[in-house]
Amino acid sequence: MSTVGGTPLFLLEFGDIVVYFTPYTTSLFILALVFTLLVIASRPERQLDIAFGTDAYLTKEISLPEMRFRRFMAIACGLASMGAVVTGDLFDFCLFTALVGICNVGIVAAVKSRHVQNAAYQYGLVALAATVLLFGGSAMVAATTGTLSLPILATGTLPAVPLAVKAFIVIGVMGEGMAPFYAAKAEMFRAPGAPYVIMCSLSSLLIFLRVIEVVVQL
Amino acid sequence: MIGQYYSWGLLVVLIAAVAGFAALAFEKDDLHRLLLIDLVEIPSLGFIALLGTDLAEALILPGLVVGIAELFALSQIYLVKEGLQDRPVRALRIEVVQRSPAPLVLSAILVVYGVILSGFTGGAIAALGLIFLLLAKDSAEDLHLLELASGMSWVLWIAAFFVFMFLPEYWYAALMGAAIGILLKVVTKMALIGTMWGEQA
């Protein structure tokens, strides 16, 4: 068996669902793992606000419950991204991606600031709307080919998946992953607490990289 | 592999999804958008249901769970964002419901129907009847009987499993025992939730 990401180094079989570690997915997995460990170990940064026209500056205090919740969400997000990058089942990939979306909303929404909450709410709406395309796409793949298993889909012996279905999946993942489209929204990242917010960007990057591998194989 | 009407079904679901998205694009009120997004979630389950296989049945559940989880998260963010957190959930304060035998009759029907169904689904329906009764009543009930029933049902369930393992020829008795056990278990657990909600009010 061979996939776009190279020959699998290691297969983990759960019955029908085969988790596979090709050089490509393994490197993504290690990236997610290392960053999750960093999130567990590190302490949140404290933002400095400088008052204009004076010498005064303020340090934003982050309360312990808020820090704990965001750290928990960041770890959950790391686990979800690890699952998303190695899973060998299309529907599992969609579920993990949706989980990454929820965790990203959680990381941002823990901040008790009205602007940040507003931005998180709008992002949540987009993420929820994107699950329609994500699940719809994977269901249509199952309808045209009869399987959801990525290794079987990669063999190329099954009927071709229409381009529109591939587009569904890619747009769905784009909706779930926050970073590239919401980085422009300053409110989203005005939230203090460096390592946790970066988890949003990293998880989005990982699921984008994985969806390329997934869609090319369909 | 797929049924002959799959394409037509797909067309209907796609129209529904497009209508939902269009409504979402026009709507400006945040709360209404939250409700509309729930509506948009339905076509996504429709896409999966159109497969019409056992696989689709198995996939609907995680799809539904993800949708509900995101909806919960969003509604919680909405509450925080609008500063509505000082309004806890209260019992059903409907005068007609509180001062009539209607809750008793309705919950009796639900409990009887649940017992007929038996198993997990029956337990959930019977429990819904009890929750409704306890929410509609004001007084706090004695919980000891519920706890006792919960414990007994657990014992019944485990005993049924032992019969399955060691006395397989009595499988029918074990099946009935397990079904009644899980029915009582679900009923009592969910009824406890109902009483706790009732007490908070």
Image: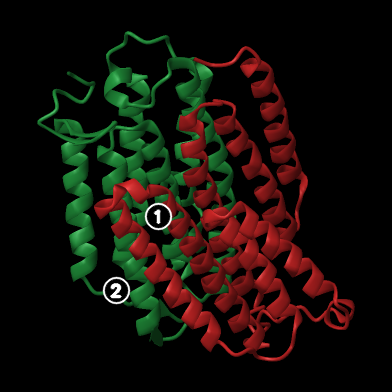
Chain colours: A green, B red
Tell me where residue A25 appears, x and y as whole percent. Answer: 21, 35
- Residue at position x 37%, y 10% from top? A158
In this view, the residue in front, B41 or B133, is B133
The N terminus of chain A sits in image quarter: top left
How far apart, in angstroms, are the residues tagged by discs 2 and 1? 59 Å
Tell me where residue B34 appears, x and y as whole percent. Answer: 67, 56
Residue type at mark 1: give it.
Ala
Q: Chain of mark 1?
A: B
In this view, the residue in front, B183 or A40, is B183
The residue tagged 1 is B174
Tell me where residue A3 appears, x and y as whole percent. Answer: 22, 21
> Is A152 on the left-hand or right-hand side of A163?
left
- Residue at position x 65%, y 41% from top? B42
The residue tagged 2 is A45
The C terminus of chain A sits in image quarter: top left
- Residue at position x 72%, y 81% from top? B91
**Label 1 CA crowd tier, 10 Å (few <14, some 14–19, many 20+):** many
Tell me where residue B131 appears, x and y as whole percent. Answer: 66, 73
User: In the rendered image of this protein, does residue A195 appear above or below residue B62?
Assistant: below
User: In the rendered image of this protein, does residue B46 appear above or below residue B88?
Assistant: above
Residue B123 shows which numbered tag? none
In this view, the residue in front, A83 or B186, is B186
Q: Quadrant of residue B43?
A: top right
Q: Say whether mark 1 and mark 2 are on the same chain.
A: no
Identify the element where label 1 is drawn.
helix
Residue type at mark 2: give it.
Glu
Q: Residue furthest left?
A: A9
Q: Residue furthest front?
A: B169
